[in-house]
Image: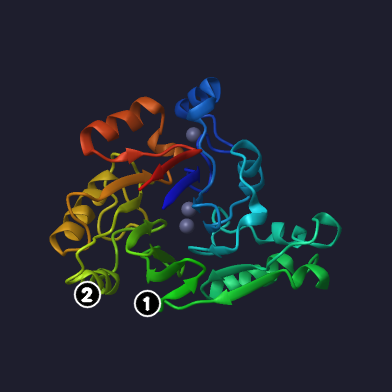
Amino acid sequence: MKITYLGTAAAEGAPAIFCDCAACMEARKRGGKELHTRSQFLIDDDLGIDFPPDAYAHSLHFNVDLRRLQHLFITHSHMDHFYAQDFILRGYKYATPLDAPLCIYGCKEVVEVFREGTRRELKSEVARNLQMVEINAFTPVPAGDYIVTPLKANHGKTPAFVYLVEKGDEGYLHLTDTGRLPQETLEFLADYYQGKKKKVGLVTFDCTFLFHEGGETARHMGLPDNRLLQSWLEENGVCDKATKYAVTHYSHNSAPLSENLQKAEREYGYIATYDGFFIDF
Ligand SMILES: [Zn+2]
Ligand SMILES: [Zn+2]
Ligand SMILES: [Zn+2]
């Protein structure tokens, strides 16, 4: 599987959209890899996770053919992960005829946001090119070559999923937006991987707080929380020494400038992602 990190910041972006703190000013001055946009992930070139307001810009900057996207899994309804309005453009005079509908999967709240966001402008010719599917935690969803299992996240009052994505015997664990995982999710993963020889190959951690700890009740994580979760996953047979770990979803408050991301890589051995970065595993 190839995972591409098209957007690697929290909701406000880093630099943040309306901020002039020292870290944001410095990132604006430097440009390039110092600019982190909102969360979007691509698996190979046909399965997506999340669709932020920056999705169109990502497609231009990183040469992504969004027409090829067939399955799109949404983590939760926050605007930095699901900008439903753009889907009114998938058909009619806005696009040449499409081969297959795009299936968008999410929890009940995501389905509601889809309805709200497309209510005014979705033409019937376009609606038939879209299929919004409500999914439930712990129920695997077959999607093309993949099996995607939504798991419960810990994201405050907002219902949210993290995902286990499997292709053949390869497994990818996508853990944004979430604090430390709920017990139910940990137990599911431990049971699922019990006796399996091949463990999860890559884990992406929510790392909104970077070097700061979120603690038990936070709805995001920092590196110390990631480390605790890594230990749990390895001790319980979900991951092993061959598993790779990546971090993403940085807040501007954590000053995700490249020297700080490199420090995180040195101190924790994780891959600190930036926009456009990809891992083949
Ligand atoms: Zn977010
Ligand atoms: Zn700032
Ligand atoms: Zn969120």
How crowded is the residue under tag 1: few (<14 C-alpha within 10 Å), some, or many (20+)? Answer: some
Q: Residue flagged by tag 2: what amino acid is it? A: Asp
* In the depicted structure, whether residue 66 falls above or below residue 132: above
Where is residue 194 drawn, in percent x and y?
18, 71
How crowded is the residue under tag 2: few (<14 C-alpha within 10 Å), some, or many (20+)? Answer: some
Name the residue nearer the viewer: 113 or 149. Answer: 149
Q: How far is the residue under mark 1 from the one under mark 2?
A: 12 Å
Q: Residue at x 66, y 46 (%)?
A: 56
Number of marks present in the image shown: 2
Q: Are marks 1 and 2 in contact (CB under 8 Å)?
A: no
The answer to whether the beta carbon of the residue marked 1 is less than 8 Å from any atom of ligand 3 is no
* In the depicted structure, whether residue 176 falls above or below residue 146: above
Q: Residue flagged by tag 1: what amino acid is it? A: Phe
Where is residue 129 drawn, in percent x and y?
72, 69
Asked if residue 201 shows in the view, the reply is yes
Q: Earlier in the sequence, mark 1 or mark 2?
A: 1
Q: Is residue 101 left or right of residue 205?
A: right
Where is residue 220 drawn, in percent x and y?
36, 54
Residue 191: mark in rendering: 2
Q: Residue at x 18, y 55 (%)?
A: 240
Which quadrant of the figure has residue 269? top left
Asked if residue 49 shows in the view, the reply is no
Residue 138: mark in rendering: 1
Q: Residue at x 62, y 73 (%)?
A: 132
Q: Is residue 107 left or right of residue 201?
A: right
For this orientation, the residue located farthest to the top is 29
Residue 130: mark in rendering: none
Where is residue 162 drawn, in percent x and y?
40, 63
